[in-house]
Amino acid sequence: MNAVDLIVEDDAWSSLDGKTRLVEQAISAACQEMPDRAPGVVAILLGSDDAIADMNARFRGKAGPTNVLSFPAGEHADNHLGDIAIAHGVVMREAGNRALDPADHLRHLVVHGFLHLQGYDHQRDDEAEAMEALECRVLARLGVANPYANEDPGTARYQND
């Protein structure tokens, strides 16, 4: 299993009990579905919308916060796979708007970010389908319902990703 370094920078995350367990469960389930994954430590930042908006602007040239950002480590990083940053306000708004359990939504975003660190992407339809299918298998291991089941086909799921 990949090791997890969880950093909680926004006190608003205190409203979600069991964050460490949820994050570790998500990474563990992803590892079980990916026996040939790249090993290494994953740093996960649970931050504020403002902090994630700053990262989104600096590293992606996009304004505003997004739910999750992934930053793969360079090829010479010693045992560090990469970083995942997740915005509290965005996650809670999305969970509320979609009638999702915030804990399940957090686990989904951790899995999504972890797959990016493993080289998965969703720029093309075939890539998106493969990544989504793997996400759904991982989430099923966790007892989390398919987060895409109620979406219209062709929805821009990753417009901010």
Image (cartoon, rainbow, N blue to C red):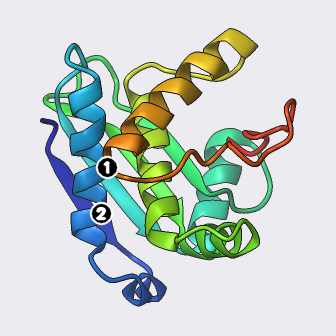
Does 62 appear above or below 101? above
Where is residue 3 drawn, in percent x and y?
14, 44
Where is residue 37 drawn, in percent x and y?
25, 19
Of the 4 image quadrants, the one containing the N terminus is top left
Near mark 1 (Cα within 10 A), the count class, few <14, some 14-19 or many ≥20, is many
For label 1, the residue is 26
Residue name at image x 67 percent, y 71 percent: 99
What's under tag 2, amino acid-wise?
Leu
User: Which of 86/101 is in front?
Assistant: 101
Residue name at image x 21 percent, y 43 percent: 28
Where is residue 76 drawn, in percent x and y?
23, 19
Near mark 2 (Cα within 10 A), the count class, few <14, some 14-19 or many ≥20, is some
What's under tag 1, amino acid-wise?
Ala
Indicate left or right for 28 with 142 as reference: left
Of the 4 image quadrants, the one containing the C terminus is top right
User: Which of 75/127 is in front?
Assistant: 127
Confirm whether residue 52 shows in the render. yes
For label 2, the residue is 22
Does 52 appear above or below 108? below
Where is residue 118 drawn, in percent x and y?
37, 23
Of helix, strand and loop, which one carries label 2?
Answer: helix
Residue name at image x 43 percent, y 89 percent: 15
Of helix, strand and loop, which one carries label 1?
Answer: helix
Q: Quadrant of residue 27?
A: top left
Indicate left or right for 10 with 20 as reference: right
